[in-house]
Image (spheres, rainbow, N blue to C red):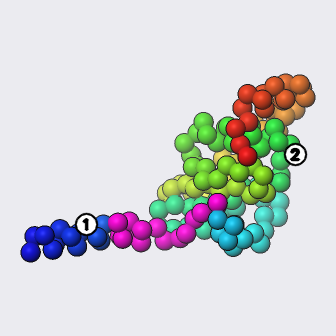
Amino acid sequence: MKTILSAIITFLLPVSAILAQDVYINPADPAFRAKYAGLEFGENFSRLAVSDSEKNYYLVDLTKFESRFEKVYFMNLVFRSDKVVCMDSDLSQDRIWFSARTEVQEAKITDYFLELKKKCADAASAFSEDEKTQWLNKNDKYK
């Protein structure tokens, strides 16, 4: 009886972990990306796309950046922080996915992304073209 109970528990634990995630999030899957391709941003830089019981999933519109320098600078700022988790670092895409715990209000995440975007614009204005090139040579690790 113990062996059967142990086998059932061993089988059910991984299944329950799979079922715990309410939504399928896989930015590397073209079908997943296509599902959200029509999501409109308007003038917004970021957008809450979907939520599950533990996390909110946000899209950031990379077309709002004027240069590769700003995109890479943005990603480096994100990775220095613990407010969001980057789920997707393919800068060749127009949109990139992030997650945040559901306890963090959407407005706080939106403001956070806007704050980072402003820092990117400020850096782009402050750096010369040569400085941007040198900085990118050291810091651009993205597709």
Pointer 1: what residue? 10
Residue 71 spot, x, y in % from top left: 77, 43
| Residue at point 67%, 38% (across, down) | 77
SS category of the residue bearing label 2: loop
Image location of residue 17, percent across then percent down: 38, 65
Taking the image as shown, residue 11 lies to the left or right of residue 56, namely: left
Looking at numbered disc 1 in the image, what kind of residue is underneath it? Thr
Q: Position of residue 23 (x, y in %)?
A: 53, 70
Position of 137 relative to 42 (above/below): above
Inspect this view and state whether residue 60 appears: yes
User: Is 142 rendered above or below residue 25?
Assistant: above
Q: Is residue 64 magenta?
A: no
Task: Give the mark, 1 or 2, whose residue is nearer the N terminus.
Answer: 1
User: Viewed as shown, does residue 2 lie left or right of 97?
Assistant: left
In magenta, the rendered stretch is 14-28
Q: Is residue 96 above or below residue 12?
A: above
Q: Residue at x 86, y 43 (%)?
A: 67
Residue at (46, 67) in percent of width and height = 21
Q: Which residue is mark 2?
A: 66
Q: Is residue 107 visible?
A: no
Specify the quadrant of the image occupied by residue 115.
Answer: top right
In magenta segment, residue 20: yes
